[in-house]
Image: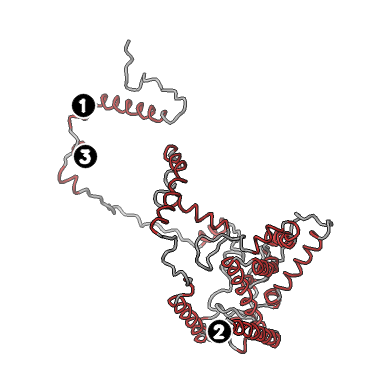
Amino acid sequence: MEAASAFYEELVLKVGEIQDLLVQFDKANEDKPTFTFWRQYMDLVSILLAFTRALRCGDWNLYMSAFKSMMPWFAAYDHTHYTRWGAVFIADMEQLAQTAPEVYQGFLDGDFVAKETKHSFNEVPFDLRLEHINKTGKVAGGLIGITRNDPARNRWSITYNERASLAEDTRSLFGLTHDDDDDEEMHKDCLQSRIKRNNHDVIQLVDQFQRYNVFQQEHMYDLVSLTTGDVASEEILNDLTHAAESGKKTITELVKKRLGTTNTDFHASLTKRKPKTFSSLYSTDTKLEQLRSKCVKPDRDIFCRIIVSMESGREVNMDELLQKELCAVPLSLATTDSVLRPTNKADLATILQAGAKETELSPSVMRTCTIIDGMALSTSNSIQEVCCALFRKLKANVDTLPPTEDALSMHLKRAHYQTKVWKQSLVTHPQLPSPINCGWQMMN
């Protein structure tokens, strides 16, 4: 036991020395934007891992430390709600030892998270634990599918507690747990299979970086996008590499003006920084004049981006460059904001008519066109016979035809009247037409 304690103390000293070396290493390379940017990304990942560890282990001090480290980043990237109420949360928790000593001691003991089983590194916040409890209602035999059936929903609600208690007693009777597949002394992330998979993922990622020569030494003094090879402008470079400092300044002003004094209303809107990123490199304003000056005017920056893209490994065919317009739409048909140019259609018709020549067929005393209906000539002697043949093809009986022309006229009137009646069915208060003079006869 004493040997283990001595080894632990020596390890703590070595870790402190490594941290000092990392600080010196960062300071020696702070003039390289690419290095600074990726070191910030590593810090963000470290903060997230520390916050996750604090929750899984119930470490209150680490939880507060990680949350405080997140605050500048909330403010830097315009997460106003987290910025505003996160400052209030930290102020309340710093005074918790004086305002509620018992609650503060409970938090130090890990009571700010819930633990369902006896395994390690598995504590979760209470809201997530409630979701685990509500999971019972969303599986087979749960509430899904019966929410609109009042009797079934009522029976489920009344018997929910009893069934949950019965299920828990059954697990205890047979010695089962909720995660009985886990080893009692080993967490899932510590298993050899998980470690092997994580190492394989890291190796693959490093191989891809080396294959495409992502972190080129000559690009260390410029901030270059890994996917597109675009070089960040001075404004984007400043916003990305100094995000933490800007966030700390915003938090300091918030605490000073809204929590320390009452000069500024606490609920007043926070000014958003709107930091520039690579996604805003090619963004344009919606104003037409600005769009014209930015989209239509080609400059040397286009060729600079092409050269950078070629050096980063992207395939660029130089023979096909500038064969098409440098705009999203043809400027002869539309403006730079994709609005069609207004034109006078009458002018187009006049121009087309002016170039057209009238042509006439030469007069002829002979017939120039003859239409022959071979089927009618070969099988029928009159139009009536053609109509009768077509009627027979519909598998209708000839006897159903009206015998005379007057009978056919009355039949058409009655069909017309019936159509009017059907149309009135779509009206709320229909007014039926009179059947008189519609092929019907009124009888007493």
Q: Position of residue 41 (x, y in %)?
A: 62, 76
Residue in front for this viewpoint, 260 or 78: 260
Mark toward the start of the polypeptide (2 vs 3) = 2
Q: Which residue type does callout 1 highlight?
A: Pro
The residue lying toward the viewer, choosing from 321 and 167, is: 167
Q: Quadrant of residue 229?
A: bottom right
Disc on the earlier residue, 1 or 2: 2
Q: Amino acid at mark 3?
A: Leu
- Mark 1 or 2: in front is 2
- The residue tagged 2 is 214
Measured as percent of width and height from the top left, residue 277 is found at: 64, 72
Vertically, is 394 above or below 236?
Answer: above
Count up the numbered dots.
3
Mark identifier at residue 403: 1
Residue at 62% from the left image edge and 89% from the top image edge: 218
Q: Residue at x 29, y 54 (%)?
A: 368
Apparent side of residue 174 relative to residue 380 in the rendered image (left or right): right
Few, some or many C-alpha atoms within 10 Å of disc 3 (few <14, some 14-19, many ≥20)?
few
Under circle 2, the secondary element is loop
Q: Quadrant of residue 391?
A: top left
Under mark 2, the amino acid is Val
Q: Is residue 133 above or below residue 117?
A: above
Residue shown at 22%/49% (left/top)? 372
In the picture of the structure, the residue carrying the numbered disc 3 is 394
Neighbour tally class for label 1: few under 14, some 14-19, many 20 plus, Cα within 10 Å:
few
Cα distance between the residues tagged 1 and 2:
92 Å
